[in-house]
Amino acid sequence: MNEFAVRNRIREFRAQRDELTQAALAEACGVTRQTIIALEAEKYSPSLELAFKLARALGRNLEEVFQYAEKK
Amino acid sequence: MTKALRRTQVLLAVAALGAAGMFLGPDGWHGIDIGPVASAVLYAALWLFLVHLAKFSGEVFPEQWSQAEKQAWVATVFLALVSFHVANLLIALPDLGAEADQLRNSATRPLWLNLGMLIFGWIVIGSAVRRQDAGTVQLDERDLRVAHRASRFANAMLALLIVWLVVALVTLPEQSRTWLRPYIAANVLIALLIARTLLENIYTVWRYRRERA
């Protein structure tokens, strides 16, 4: 059976926003830079509130940034 | 690996050697009591680490470590040292006979001094580490989630330790009689709480490592 997980495109959208740094994104969302690192590596699934904050900081919709898709 | 990080590892290894030397007891190494030398090595390494931390504040820990992970490491090191001392006390107390029932006895006197120094060192190093990330978010939902998991793990371990203690008391009545004295039993209970906190921090450190792997 296929396993599903929360996937994200944070790194891709960060690069599209003039190489927004992990530190700047972390500050905008009120989290540590290490959490952004863990999110980009898909080692951590954020709370719904943090997911909305990230999407807003990246100027995208929630569904664009996060998907519930098959594990890598 | 940076030079500062390598130096951190060397200092921690020297401190661990010192702690291990202290744990050998009066029979020591090949019959030689190396306790005082080991103690001096341990505290010298810790103070050098503090100086090192003040000098290379941003490089002592890897930059991918969050503040909570750094604090968990510091707590793990100091709690391991505290556990060494308390374990030494628990081993020494039953051999003291009637003296073990006194609050001030020959085994506890050096312990208080060592614990005082360790707690002071922990506060100083902990606040120096905290200052490294001043002005940025130090704790967020991921850290709280790890802390919650660590707490649940530590509570389960504490329950297991208590069950183990009860089973030991019931199945080994002769051997456990030496421990069934108010002052020793009180120290055993404190040791259980210290063990719980140590396990909580070890789990925290492991969890952060696993999330990075």
Image (cartoon, coloured by chain):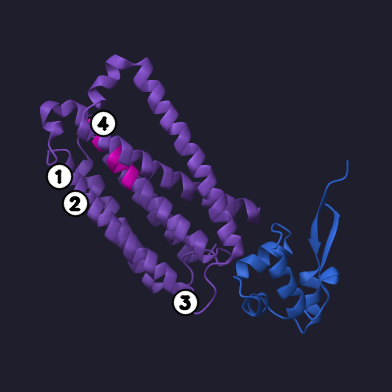
Chain colours: A blue, B purple
- Name which quarter of the figure residue A28 lies in: bottom right
From this viewpoint, is residue B51 visible? yes
Question: Dot 1: what SS?
Answer: helix
Q: Which residue is mark 3?
A: B134
Residue at (80, 60) in percent of width and height: A7
Q: Amino acid at mark 1?
A: Arg
- Residue at image location 84% in from the left, 62% down from the top: A67
Sooner in the amino-acid sequence: mark 3 or mark 4: 4
Asked if marks 3 and 1 touch (Cβ < 8 Å), the reply is no
Residue B133, above or below B86: below
State the SS at label 3: loop
Residue B43, position as x, y percentages in the image: 27, 55
Relative to B177, say whether A32 is above or below. below
Residue B28, visible in the rendered structure: no
> Which chain hosts label 4?
B
Disc 4 marks which residue? Answer: B91
Kindly indicate the quadrant of the structure image that contains residue A38.
Answer: bottom right
Q: Which residue is mark 1?
A: B109
Label 4 SS: helix
Left or right: A52 as drawn, with respect to B47: right
Residue under numbered circle 2: B113
Which span of residues is magenta-colored? Answer: B82-92
Disc 3 + disc 4, Cβ < 8 Å:
no
